Every structure is written in C-alpha cells, then in structure tokens.
Amino acid sequence: MDSRTEPAESETEPEPDTAVRRRASPEDTAVRRRASPEDTAVRRRASPKDTAARPPLLRELLLVVGLFLVYKVGRQLATGHTAEAFRNADRVWDWERSLHLPGEGAVQNALLHSDTLVHIANTYYATVHFPATVAFLVWLYLKRPAHYVWARRVLAVVTGAALVGHLFFPLAPPRLLKAAGLIDTGQAYGPTVYGAHPATDAVANQFAAMPSLHFGWALMVAIGLIAATRSRWRWLWLLHPLITLVVIVGTANHYWLDAIVAAALLGIALAVIHLPHRTTTTAGRVQERADDSVRDIPELVGAGR
C-alpha cells in the first residue's frame, strides 16, 4: 500500500485568474483606462443629476401664467386713485430735486434730437420688456434648470413686491406731471401701449410707475445671464438694463426713483434667494470627473470571474 501523500495542487500551482493578472501588461492597463467619448456621453445622459433640477414643464407654465394674471388683476385694482397718484407724483418730483438727481428732461431732450430715435425708444419700451423676460426664462429652463428655478423665484418676489407698491403708492408718471414739463413721446411719436386718457384706460394702469418693473426685470435678465454663462462677453448683457433705463426715463414713463426702488427690491430678493451652486452643466462635469477617477483605478483582468 503506497502511503505517499500527494501535495495539494492548490498549494503549489497558481490559480488561472491569478496567473492572468500577473501577466497583465502596462499596455493592457492603459487600454482599460481609456474610454470612448460615446461611453462618456452615455454616462452623462444616464446620470439622474442632469435632469433632476428641471421642474415639470406643465406646472411651470401654469405657475408663470397664474402669477402674470394675478399681477395684471392686481394692477387694475390700483386704478381709480387719480388724485392720490398726482399728489405722490409731486412728492417724488420734489424728493428727486432734494436728492440732486439729474432731471429726466435731459435724457428726453437727447432723444428728441431725432424723430427716428424717439420712435425706436418708444418701440423698445413697448415690445422688448415682456418678450425678453420670457425668452430669458425659456433659455434658462432648457439650458440651466437650476438657474431657472432661482431666477423664477427672484422675479416672482420682485413682481409681488412691486404689486404691493402699486396698490399702496399709486404714482402718476412724469409724462403726466405738469411740473415736469415733459412730452408723452408715445402719444406724440408712437407707438404707445397706453390710452390717451389715463383715468379711463381699461388696458393698463398708468398710475403704477413705482417701482419700474421694466428696469427691475431687465436688470434681473442681465444678472441671470451673467451668472448662468461663462463667456467673457457675458458682461455685455448689462447693456439691456442700461438701455432700458435710458428708454423709460427718456420717454417720461418713469422717474429715476422708480428705477432705484426697483433695483433695491431686486437686491433684497437676490440676498434672500441664493444663487444655485451647481447647474446641470457642472453636474455633468462632476459626473465625468468621477467616471475618469474610476477609470484611473488599475483594474485586474479576470477579477470577479
């Protein structure tokens, strides 16, 4: 009887997977670390972070339309205070003179040097304000969802505060104030969005000058686009509120103080509603960096088999 004991193969021979791992060359590791652009794109598309910040479209449409209707109805509730609106206009005019603010007439006189320039200013006032804000929100919703939520909240707060101001401080614009000596350029040169008789205007409340949402919204559009983009030319968006300021003052639709109050309200809203730290674009970049880090970890051929 042979009493020799055969050594166990598991103690003397390497496992096949271990042998393959030992034979893995640096070239194989380099190949494993590389990933095709298509693989990276698939990972980014699959990441839930890319779409998590975008709210449902139907809900946003209902919300924005609802806020707009509430604002329009609220402005109409502020009508019928003609005498108070003109008393407040006299006060604002006196406040501006005591603060040594430049006269609105200086801006209007510059526009009146050219009929074409006045017409362009009236057209800008009538047509750019609302469409530009809508386009701004649509672009943010599609390209920068996290910034969209932030901007929509800021605009809602500023607009709500403006509505309260219109209700409790009705104000006739400078074009209606005799002491200002300014021309209603909309009526004189066209186009205009207001009726010839402010007290009976059923389309718009002409006694809602302070604060100026034309300027407040324009300034928010510029700030929002500067915050949401990285182009070195993005600061040119500040031209929009600058042109808007010249237009609203030059056409005698607003006082300087209307714009100052709007800017102050916007500043408060921006201080309370913080800018998002990360957008879907940066989320995609973070995910891509995470994928690269995973690919940089040396893999073992045959592991897990």
Image: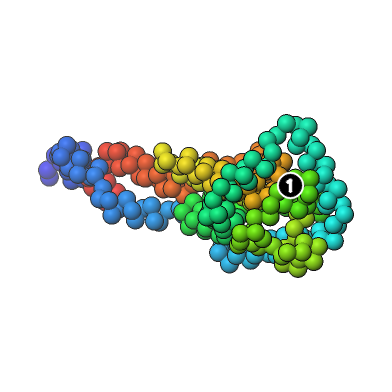
| x then y, percent, for residue 149 | 58, 52
Front in this rendered view, residue 128 or 269:
128
- Residue 253 appears anywhere in the view: no
| x then y, percent, for residue 14 | 18, 40
The outermost residue toward the right is 83
| x then y, percent, for residue 186 | 64, 58
- Label 1 Cα neighbours within 10 Å, binned few <14 / some 14-19 / many ≥20: few
Q: What residue sits 69% from the left and 62% below the top?
A: 194
Q: What element does badge 1 sit on?
A: loop
Residue at which label 1 appears? 181
Q: What residue sits 47% from the left and 49% below the top?
A: 280
The answer to whether 264 appears left or right of 76 in the picture is left
The answer to whether 5 appears left or right of 92 in the picture is left
Front in this rendered view, residue 54 or 104:
104
The kind of residue tagged 1 is: Gly
- Residue 197 appears anywhere in the view: yes
Quarter location, residue 198: bottom right
The outermost residue toward the left is 2
| x then y, percent, for residue 145 | 52, 53
Is residue 199 depicted above or below 182 in this figure?
below
Quarter location, residue 31: top left
The answer to whether 50 appears left or right of 267 in the picture is left
- Quadrant for the N terminus in the image: top left
Q: What residue sits 71% from the left and 44% below the top?
A: 255
